[in-house]
Image (spheres, rainbow, N blue to C red):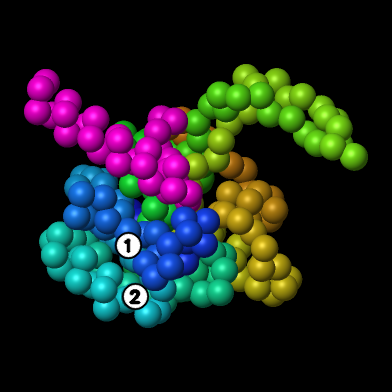
Amino acid sequence: MNVALIFAGGTGRRMNTKSTPKQFLKVYGKPILAYTLEKFQHSHDIDAIILVSLSDWIDYAWKIVDQYRLDKVSSIVAGGATGQESIYNGLREAERLYPSEAIMLIHDGVRPIVEEETIAEAIASVREYGSAITVSPAIETVIISGKDDTVNRIMDRSDCFYAKAPQCFYLKDLIAAHRRAIADGIETFIDSASLMDHYGHSLHTVHGPANNIKITTPTDYYLFKALVDAKENADIFS
């Protein structure tokens, strides 16, 4: 069984929105979260979806599920104080509903351009290697900073990649690592890859397109809007 765990518990401080979290902002009348959920809804490889939402927005999230006929969404649970806690809440729900051998695809609710091929390759990677971290090549020079605003080291760009999503593991492995982090009092892991690496798991990469962006800033929002425009024009004129 393959389960997408979509976490949409952020408040979007960097988007400068006053009342609406970024995942619920609309592009051409459709919430960004709906675009993301549709990618997994329409994937032949996904059996179910668990959504982690801000607690005050769970009712609205269910309205999105109903409006866009996202019948693979089996549950919506409240997020936590951090991204790490939010993912753990979703994993606990997955543990309640599904077998421990289920493959979990951890994905940002504001990363709506993930491709069907990336989802399929990630699942295949977990089956073969036990993990899948979606990446794209670094397209600018990466430096390691030193003291007093100096450059300590310039990385070979051919060795550098951006970690993206989905990040995928077997449910039993990922939830066990989360429980180790809780026992160790660590609450600062920024994503599943960092957590699993910390606890000694080997991470296998899956290469995805650069446009698999996470909508974090106003610039990202307008870039996504432009990409939606480009796709619609291509569909019309192809």
Which range is magenta?
209-238
Assign a secondary structure to mark 1.
helix
**Front residue of this view, candidates 27 and 120:** 27
Residue type marked 1: Phe
Q: Are marks 2 and 1 in contact (CB under 8 Å)?
A: yes
- The prevailing secondary structure element of the residues shown in magenta is helix
**Front residue of this view, candidates 195 and 237:** 237
Q: Residues within 10 Å of mark 1 (few under 14, many from 20)?
A: many
**Front residue of this view, candidates 19 and 209:** 19
Q: Which mark is residue 57?
A: 2
Above or below — where is 145 with respect to 34?
above
Residue drawn at (47%, 56%) of the image: 15
Based on the displayed image, in which of its 4 quarters is residue 66 positioned? bottom left
Residue lying farthest to the right in this orientation: 147
Q: Work out how far the residue at label 2 is from the one at label 1, CA to CA, in angstroms.
A: 9 Å
Question: Does residue 32 appear to the left or right of 141 in the view shown?
Answer: left
Residue 223 counted in the magenta span: yes
Residue 94 % position (x, y): 39, 69
Residue type marked 2: Trp
Q: Which mark is residue 214?
A: none
Q: Which residue is identified by label 1?
A: 24
Residue 165 counted in the magenta span: no
- Quarter of the image that includes the C terminus: top left
Based on the displayed image, in which of its 4 quarters is residue 96 positioned? bottom left
